[in-house]
Image (spheres, grey):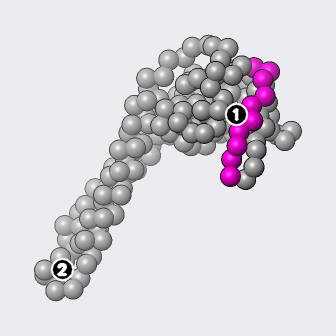
Amino acid sequence: MHINKRNLLHIAIQKLELEIASFREVVKREEGAMQDAPSARDTWSDTTRSQKESLVGVLQKQYNEISKALNALKQIKIMSSEKIGIGALVELEEDKKRILYLILPGTRMKLEVDNIAVELISSASPTAQALYDHKEGETVKIKVPAGIRTLKILRVQ
């Protein structure tokens, strides 16, 4: 499997920009609905406005997280390194199945590029932490709730 890392980052940025635009619209719509909703003071018992306020808060938090991930993606420098770190595109084998991870700060999503699935994982995730500073050809064992994952590093970009 060969994927151009620059192309992959470009696709991830586009996807996040679309998500941000969508979230912006949803937040705006829900804020309008919140303003139009009766308050408990208006009806003595209706909690619609309070529920809308909670929903808008959750949506705003998700929007902020996606925005941070997008900003981090835009600042990733394309460098080659033998060791795994932030910005590394890592091809792994687990149970005779190939997996591609792109390690980035603060994001998690799945993308498909040229019919190949790539998982963007957070640099703070247990998997990324276990892979740090390892090189091509090494095998890494990761303890997870379901047992132990054994990952063979096939390629690092």
Q: Is residue 152 left or right of residue 79?
A: right
Which contiguous range is marked in magenta? 136-145
User: What is the quadrant of the C terminus in the image?
Assistant: top right
Q: In this view, does 64 lie to the left or right of 48?
A: right
Q: Tell me where residue 108 appears, x and y as whole percent.
A: 54, 42
Q: Tell me where residue 60 appears, x and y as whole percent.
A: 32, 52
CA distance for labels 1 and 2:
51 Å
- Amino acid beneath label 2: Ala
Quarter of the image holding residue 18? top left
Label 2 crowd (10 A; few <14 / some 14-19 / many >=20): few
Q: In this view, does 10 lie above or below 66?
A: above
Reading the image, the residue beneath label 1 is 100
Q: Tell me where residue 54 appears, x and y as whole percent.
A: 30, 64
Reading the image, the residue beneath label 2 is 40
Dot label at residue 79: none
Residue 139 on the magenta span: yes
Report the residue that reaches farthest toward the right. 96
Residue 72 shows in the view: yes
Residue 25 shows in the view: no
Residue located 47% across and 37% down the image: 106
Residue located 35% across and 51% down the image: 61
Q: What element carries label 1?
A: strand
Q: Which of the pair 29/44 is nearer the observer?
A: 44
